[in-house]
Image: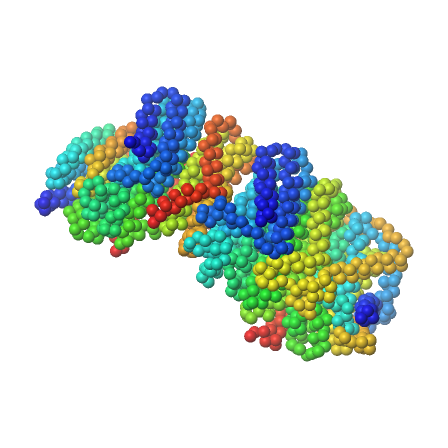
Amino acid sequence: MIHAYQLVVVLPYVAAVLLMAIPGYRVGATLNVIVSALTLGVGLWLVAAERIVGDYAIVDEFNIVFIVINTLVGFTTALFSASYIGHEIEIGRLPSGFLRFYHAMFQAMMGSMNLALVANNIGVMWVGLELATLITVVMVGLYRTPQSIEAAWKYFILASVGISLAFFGTILIYLAGQPALGEGVPAMTWSLLQGAAASMDPAILDLAFIFLLIGYGTKVGLAPLHAWLPDAHAEGPTPVSAVLSGLLLNVALYALLRFKMVVAGQPAALDPGPIMVVMGLVSLIFAAFMLYQRRDIKRLFAYSSIEHMGLIVFAFGMGGPLANFAGLLHMAMHSLTKSGIFFAVGHIAQAKGTQRIAEIKGLSATHPRLAVAFALAVLAICGMPPFGVFASEFLILTTTFAREPWLALLPAFGLLVGFGALLLRLQDTIFGEPTGPAHRVDASSVPMVLHLLLVFTAGIFLPPALVAWFQRAAELLG
Amino acid sequence: MPELYVLGVALGALAVAAILAAVTRGPALAFVYPLSALAATVIGIVDLGALLRGGELAAVLPIGLPAIGLHLRLDTLSAFFGIVINGGVLAASVYGMGLDRTHELTPRVEPLFPLFAAAMNLVLIADDAYAFLFSWELMSLASWALVAARHTDPESRRAAHLYLVMAAIGTAALLFAFGGLAGPTGGYAFDTIRHHRPAPLIAALILAAALVGCGSKGGLIPLHAWLPLAHPAAPSHVSALMSGVMTKVAIYGFVRIAFDLLGPPAWWWALPPIILGVVTAVLGLLYAVLDRDLKRVLAYSTIENVGVIFVALGLALAFRANGQNEGAAVAMAAALLHVLNHSWFKSLLFLGAGAVLHATGRRDLDGLGGLIHRMPRTAAFFLVGALAISALPPLNGFVSEWLLFQAVIAAPELPQAALHFASPAIGAMLALAAALAAACFVRVYGTAFLGRPRSVEAANAHDVPLAQQIAMGGLAFLCILGGLLGSVLAVALAPVLGDLVSTGLPIGEGPTPFSLIAFDPARSVYDAPVIALFVAIASLTTLVVVHRISERRSRRGPAWDCGFPDPSPVTQYTASSFAQPLRRVYGTLAFASRETVEMPPPGDQRPARLSVVVVDHLWRVFYATPGRAVLNLSSRLNVLQFLTIRRYLVLMFAALVLLLALAAVTT
Amino acid sequence: MTQAYEISHLLAGAMLLTSFALLYQERVAAVLNAFAAQSVLLALAVAWAAVSDDRPDLFITAAIALTLKGIVIPVALHRTVARLGIHREVEKVVGVGVALIVGLALTGLAEALVVKVARGTASHAREELALALAIVLLGFLMMIVRRNAVTQVVGFMSMENGLILAATGARGMPLVVEVSVAFSVLIALFVFAVFVFRIRERFDTVDIEALDRMRGDRR
Amino acid sequence: MTADFFVQLLAQGAQMTFVLLIAPLAVGVVRRVKALLMRRQGAPLLQAYLDLAKLVRKESVIAESASWLFRSAPYLIFALTWVAAALVPSFASGLMFNWAADVVALVALLGAARALLALAGMDVGTSFGGIGSSREMMIATLAEPAMMLIVLTLAIAAGTTRLAGVADFFIAEPFAVRVSMALSLIALVIVALAENARIPVDNPVTHLELTMVHEAMVLEYSGRHLALIEAASHLKLVLYLSLLVCLFAPFGMAPADAGLAGWLIGLAAWIIKILACAALLGVWEVSIAKMRVFRLPDFLGVAFVFGFLAILLAFLTRGVFA
């Protein structure tokens, strides 16, 4: 009997193969949406289905959170790109031949990410994550403009180095686990590793965690390993930016957290908490300052992704049920909000025919609805009510202050600095006398609105089931 | 419980109004104001009931923060502030009904007005940290959008930006405060917080955070700079709400934390609010006296009043910490009454300013003048407001001022030496503030409404629509009534004072039922009605007598002006010239103001020039410099965006080696 | 057993030496030769591991290492270098001396880190782990002290040699073969890119003059 | 009871009339003394009354640009000052309505009168009115802090802010907290000079434009309005004089429960004291010169400093530092 977790991986891959074969982008787009919808369905089914702990696959409270977010954002993004990429082809920014390529890549990427998520084997997970990365590399370079090629190239090199370091870390984990669990597959299995952590050699675990932190941290976009992220976001097609910010960073973070669990199991080893706190704060504050100098609107929000990843890593570094819960919540909220913002940015880019902030003015006069949606989305990511990010930031900052009053000043400082910048840009874009062209936007606004609604609901009311589920996940994180 | 449902319905109505207004355009938008007025009235009545009954209503909704839910509670304190808020909202809405339906309604303002009102009400009834900050931030957000309503004006954009950033800083501070109050276990419900006692150091931090959080919203110096930019930028009836009412929400927040949640105070908690308050009061007015923009002057005077209120709160803390509940009651009553009074006359003044703006299209005092002839009603109402805010008897401003002075006079009875030495300083500074306020508003009224018009617009101004006159008239009436019936208000305050400082003002022990008593009748009494009666009798008798004696009527003629009357209105004293003596006396100290006269030699045709330099140190130190610092740092860091790939690899490598070295040294 | 271990240890040590040789070489051609040597050594080490732990599947890895990295890629790169006419000097960021000293320091660090690993655990992997770690770090160093694209690619590949070495050293580790294949693909992509984008000077000059001017947010 | 009530009412009424009646006389005394000291003939002692009578009967010319405020202000100013004066214990403490306003309220009443006057000064829209008003308000900002300090000292000494209470206290123990009272006496004198626009703060007889303060404000008034303003300023002078004597020389003043006899004695004592002070004022005014406007901060700063010292000493003597 086939299980949901298999579907969640297999379905996209199959779709990828199909999409390669199908000519004509309308059909492809539709199929893409349908498959993504199915995957989402499977993801939701997975929530209900019983938990699995196999040799190669694991489905527990923790990674279901990620899988659901993944499939959900995957679906909305597919919906978005169906109309968006179509427009790109009409205006001749993309040769339509690329489209089937694009959709196939999209599905393959989703599949790889799901593979990384359900894998119970650190090797398999590594493979999945790296596949996803390499595919996104290709998608970033899709436009074949000098900028996009450079961005892709930069992404490719930094990612590859990250890949290698992460793999070295994986080997080290195996070496650490081998004595306790014996040779072969068991020593690469999550569930077993976690159990055996106490009997592992602390020195090797330290080494392993450092390599994994640098390796996977590169994909999470932690400063100073972030360099690929802004350009990749800015130069790739907007849906890809949405997926990068919304999903890929999460998956990398997921891997990091898994390893944190293992390392935390060995008290003699280096405590990952403080290291993550420091890296998180560095990323948060650095990104916040970088926001001020941005001229490209997508790069702006790419940096804001770095900022929020920093905050999330900080929260998980703090640890404890409340902080972990807040971290998970913030991660979910950030995925939804940020991808929503990228949808909005896509609309704006189509409306004004540019991504340069300086050339986007007075949207509230020319495109009132879009302006309102965009403003709401940006305010949401800035942690303003009535949106979910407010809830998560509320929890993170209050608990931090309650535990480490002085430490709490740093994330608050970073967030405020970042807020100042984002608000400035927001006002520049939606207020003032409109300038430049004002095209009609024909990309679908459903995904954007959907995301906003979800984030809004989360700010007002979190379903108890969801909360309980998140809390269990937080407990798993310890 | 039914009251809560009524409350909910009213708030819901406001929300619905906001949503409907968001999808309507044009004249239809006018429906917002009657609806808000109705809702405000209903909520106000509910609050009044709760206040007089002294009971409290509570409810928990299964939304909001997980495992905690959304706690709502209407106790006497929130009821009192609710009355303040909804009074202001009502006035603003009535004023709004008078707006020109064809020109003055915009989808940038009307949908947000009810939202703003609802958010403010929500803050008051919030009974857990999440709900509180949620609605608090919503309030900031709504008002931000209202400030940015005139979005094509770069000035109001700048104001909006500064405002929301300062609001965010305040919210962050409050987050800390509530984080400390709730503790690591995250007991965010206020009931839980009341039972959880933070350690002394933490408590001190919480107080500081609360001061920053509420101070930044109330305009406590040095967190004030956004206020004189943002409040005037909004449409006038919204300015009235922001200045007259929203600042009171900030006060509420501080009272709630310092007197209710934080537990028994230590005596030195009193010092920060008192010191900041005094500085704010005096500096705020010095700013106001030197400013030439009508609405900005009003905004600065709001800062001053907030400062005064914080002084009163600080004194209340000091008395309470020493168990001198009567003193605490007097100080607290002063604070709360001033909250109420200020909400009345400041709203009145801002609506008046709005009327002037509507009639003349100008806000600069030096372009106005003589409006008392063109818009007599507005002028009369504004006069009441101006005299009231100058704390002159028998108007309401003086009632709270009097109580405050009584509290200051009692301060030497506190055991702590620091407070002894503070008390005369506080007294002197408050007296200075009062005198400056009088000067400031004589200046404002004298230049805007009296004298001869200084511009064409002022010369053919016209009075505003009836609805707006009603709004102002009502507030003016309240100012007079509140001045006469301070004792009645004291009675109404009794429940709040009972809850906060466990005793009220002595009631009904005075010579007449209307005497306001501090401590005890033998000590200090102020009986406004009697004095008012005396003044009335005296003036009327004088009128009669004088007119009986002097048979000849008066005659109109040209102004005497020492025999050299000059027809041109330019020769009048302007706002700037009125401020000159005060600037000479205080400006050199506060703003390092310098004036240089360049007098051309005899026979030279060029006019003599007087140029004045005024430096705003606070802005330089607390705003300009940090702002520049952030930008500098960001542009330095920005290099990291443009490195070569190899250099990025170097960064990665460095990070790796660093961590490895760390692992190598740690055992 | 022990002498089996001695041999693998010897090979690993030899690989480390070649890494230093890479750092030392000044001319691209020489660098490529040094790399080829390292790859061959890796192939031997893997093969030996295959024999001693009798894991025949490792022979595949060995074969890949030998053919692809030992022969094909070096030859191909020799061609490119010749065609792009950059076979002579390599512009270095730091002098050879400094590079070597840093290399030594890194090796020392690697040792210091592995010394802390308790004996007995992963017993025979211990020394090999130290060597592999050193090789990886040196490869990374190679990538950042040279400005020439080809040498940077070589640096990456020698890093990857270190990884394979570690992987084979980790006894009974599954997926080693698959991973080595995956890496070969990755490297192929690298080299492919070097051809396609005609990267003449260094990584960040994909040969379209625009790029250096553009780089990110300069627009 | 009712009889007593009416007696009380009568007494209060009597005080109102007395202050009103004595005011011009006091001014007359001041002018007379100054004249004599300057070796001038000087106007007769009762000239002030005659002036008022004349002014009231004259028609008043009102500038075209004047508003209703200009016309109604004099009545209010007069009434406010009058009531304030009536609330200061003069010949007897604890009169019927003494309690209605304590010192703070009293100061505020005068403040109200001042604000109205300043507004009236700006109403016509001339340069001189503006000069007067702005300077008047500036002086007030300098005077009121000092006044507040004096009030504080009294309150610390007597434990109340009701003037009657303070008076009773000083009647009971005239030599309480000597030093600080002496200091605050000086402070109060300075404040009084400033408030009444006397030399050296302002010169009541000058019409040299640039030195005017009070006179500049009332420049546009004439006829009955001017009369009222003048009367108000006379009343204010009497008010401050009786404040001084009630606080620092309360002897002779009838206590709260005194009968008619006590009142008569008190009245006599009060009149004598007032006139004596007026004479002193005259002497003072001839003996010093008018100050430049921007020297005033220093002058009133003295009052502030003395007031502050007074409080600190009061702290010590009352031993509030436990």
Q: Residue at x 56, y 71 (%)?
A: B415
Q: Position of residue C128 (x, y in %)?
A: 17, 45
Q: Is residue B524 above or below residue A166?
A: below
- Outermost residue on the front side: it is B1
In the image, what residue occupies the spot 81% across and 48% down?
D64
Q: Nearer the viewer, residue D303 or A203?
A: A203
Q: Residue furthest top?
A: A23
Q: Horizontal placement of A355 versus B489: left or right?
A: left
B626 sits left or right of B605 in the view? left
Does residue D78 lie above or below A222 as drawn?
below
Q: Can residue B550 be seen at all in this image of the molecule?
A: yes
Q: Is residue D279 visible?
A: no
The quarter of the displayed image where residue B318 is located: bottom right
Instruction: Look at the picture and state if C57 lies above or below B444.
Output: above
Tell me how many marks there are.
Answer: 0
Image quadrant occupied by the C terminus of chain B? bottom left
Q: Residue at x 33, y 41 (%)?
A: A60
- Name the residue nearer the viewer: B199 or D117: B199
Q: Nearer the viewer, residue A135 or D22?
A: A135
Q: Is residue A300 above or below residue B629?
A: above
